[in-house]
Image (cartoon, rainbow, N blue to C red):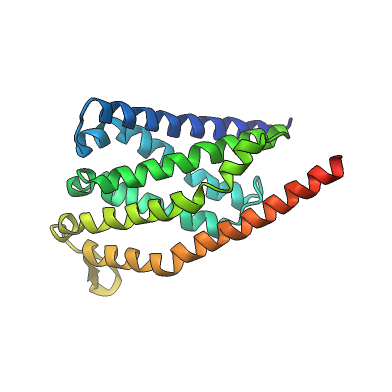
Amino acid sequence: MGFGSAYLGAYNLACAGGWAFALVLFAKAQYEGASWRETWNSMSTTVMAVQTVAVMEILHSLVGLVPSPWMTTLLQVSSRLVVAWGFLYSCEASQDHYAMALTTVSWALVEVPRYLFYVFNIMGNVPYPLFWLRYSLFAVLYPSGITGEIMTIVNGFDCLKALKPVPLAGGISISMYHMALLVLATYVPGAPFMYSHMVTTRRKQFKRRKAASKKAE
């Protein structure tokens, strides 16, 4: 195993562990009767850390460490970072709502099997149940995650309206509220694109695995 594979294996294993730990913290807080905001506070450091470090995946794609298209990776990572830092981290109204749970739990349930899939793929042997989860959970968790993200953004509107406009070039300024509206607008083309991309990827991967299985017989 070369350095690149060893690095990616360690990276993916750490990220899988981070998201799994976030799920444990969420379950623990809810079991103890915590409010949505208290639940967020208990898991925020873990969620913010593991989601922020995902910017490395854009670099991995750009330098060819992984075959994933960089544009798709950029779209997914950047949209999550906007939701995470711009709303979950910054706005109490976004924290104290069930949309926070819908968003973060959807992210975590997608990411744990995804990162574990990458770990086993590097080792050259992905168990079928993990393969199936990697390319099937998105059918439910992408819509739930996107719904949670949109609701989280909307919940933060009042928070953003209270902020001063951001100055741009030429004496022009834009309010954070209007920037949030622009972010929401990107979901119109972005959400169907990401979902259709995963549908296409799922079809290709299942065909490839089936062909490899027949060849091995």
Q: In this rendering, would 12 be left or right of 38? A: right
Residue at left 47%, top 54%?
76
Whether residue 118 is visible here, answered yes or no, is: no
Question: Is residue 155 left or right of 64 when viewed as pictured?
Answer: left
Residue at the spot x=36%, y=42% of the render? Answer: 104
Closest to the observer: 58 or 198?
Answer: 198
**Residue 16 seen in render:** yes
| x then y, percent, for residue 161 | 15, 61
Which residue is the extreme one toward the left?
162
* Percent x, y of residue 154: 24, 59
Q: Which quadrant of the figure has residue 32?
A: top left
Q: Residue at x 28, y 67 (%)?
A: 181
Q: Quadrant of the N terminus?
A: top right
Q: Is 181 or 37 nearer to us in this picture? A: 37
Q: Is 180 rendered above or below residue 115?
A: below
Q: Quadrant of the C terminus?
A: top right
